[in-house]
Image (tube, rainbow, N blue to C red):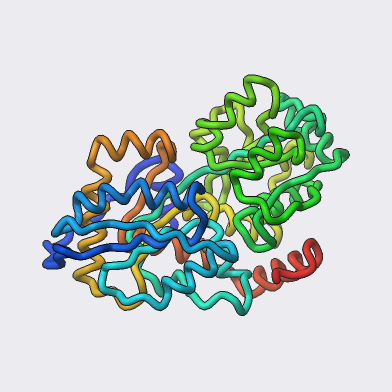
Amino acid sequence: MSVRKLMAAAALGGGVALAPMAASAADFSGKTVTIIVPFKEGGGASRYGRTFQPFLAKYLPGKPKIVVLNKPGGSSILGANYFQKQKGDGLTLLTCSTSTMTSFLFGGSKVKYDPNSWRVAIANPLGTAFYARSDQTGITGKNAKKDVEALRKANLVFGAKNKTSAELRAFLAFDILGFFPKPVFGLSTGKQRKAILRGELNINYDSAAKYNKSVTKWVKKGTVTPLMNLGLLLPDGSVVKDPFLGAESPSVVEMYQSVNGGKKPSGTHWQVLKNFIAMGVSASKSMALPPGTSDDVYNTYVDTFKKIYKDPKFLDIVKKDMGKYPHSFGKDAQAVIKFATTMTPENKKWMNAWLEKKFGGSS
């Protein structure tokens, strides 16, 4: 299946159908499988890995012991570098997140890993929801044009982990709309959320599932106001609003059109932002095996993840924590990662210049 067809399946909310694979002889009896999470405990990637933990123990042949190892540092660079050197014997998995992809593209000499050398077994999209404090920004969430105009005049403050973390997609979206918040680096996603509730930040974003689960109650209280969503990428290259954030939530494209006479975004900035939408939405979370993993072991994991996704208990957990987004397996999951981490030399040059201008470089 082509990447374009894959993105179409994801955007339409359908699962990806794959041809059945031959039975595998891989057996993990008496073994211990380690899921490496290149982030601190408590974040989305850590929850993602721990969600799979008991189900991998249940469905992998031989019912091995499954442990989770958090190796945080450098927006996943430390843990991903460690994973890159592991044996492809099926005893090590990596939980990947958007920061893993952005750090690969712009993390510089510290990055010693390559996601396209990994054997990606499953990929899960997850939307991005933006919100702000109306008391500090003047937005109402009722008129896109007026909200953008208000944000252009406001003294915005936005939290991020560092210069090359997942928040790059937010900075790119803000910039294309004509405003650029003051960045406060060193804040995890959880700390960002707490800071905006305290009024220390005034604009923020969350995954769609986390937004629906934890932020909507603060919307009802009037503490924060919904702004927009990053959208979903369609096979024709267009971006539409996130279908799981409600019809009232405009996409970044609609926000742009509201202040540009209906004209759609275009040019290099927009092409780069679309690349980040692929990283931040289509490849938001994934599970990979190390380079050199045999087809036998790889196919065993792909088949195991398929079985897990038929477990009603697992589906109930995923629905609550990640929403109703589709997922892809095997070669299709690999294609999602390749799509997300492939940027033309011209666009990467533009991005590096943008990083230098906005943050004084990526290091």
Q: Quadrant location of residue 73?
A: bottom right
Look at the image and tell me in which quarter the N terminus lies: bottom left
| In this rendering, position of residue 78 left or right of residue 68 | right
Total labels drawn:
0
Vertical order, 8 against 355 (above or below): above
Q: Position of residue 348 (x, y in %)?
A: 65, 70
Query: Quick check: 149 left or right of 272?
Result: right
Please identify the quarter of the rendering in which residue 22 is found.
bottom left
Q: Left or right: 326 with respect to 356?
A: left
Q: Position of residue 311 (x, y in %)?
A: 23, 40
Q: Nearer the viewer, residue 311 or 159?
A: 159
Q: Kindly tell me whether residue 25 is visible in this rendering.
A: yes
- Residue at the spot x=14%, y=63% of the render? 29
Quick one: 278 or 107, which is closer to the camera? 107
Q: Position of residue 291 (x, y in %)?
A: 36, 75
- 285 w.r.t. 193: above or below: below
* Residue 2 visible somewhere in the drawing: no
Question: Looking at the image, which residue sits at the far top?
Answer: 221
* Residue at x 35% of width, y 37% of height: 317
* Residue at 45%, 53% in the rendered image: 285
Residue 333 point in image, percent of width and height: 37, 59
Residue beneath the point at 31% across and 51% down:
53
Viewer-closest of 177 and 46: 46
Quadrant of the image containing the C terminus: bottom right
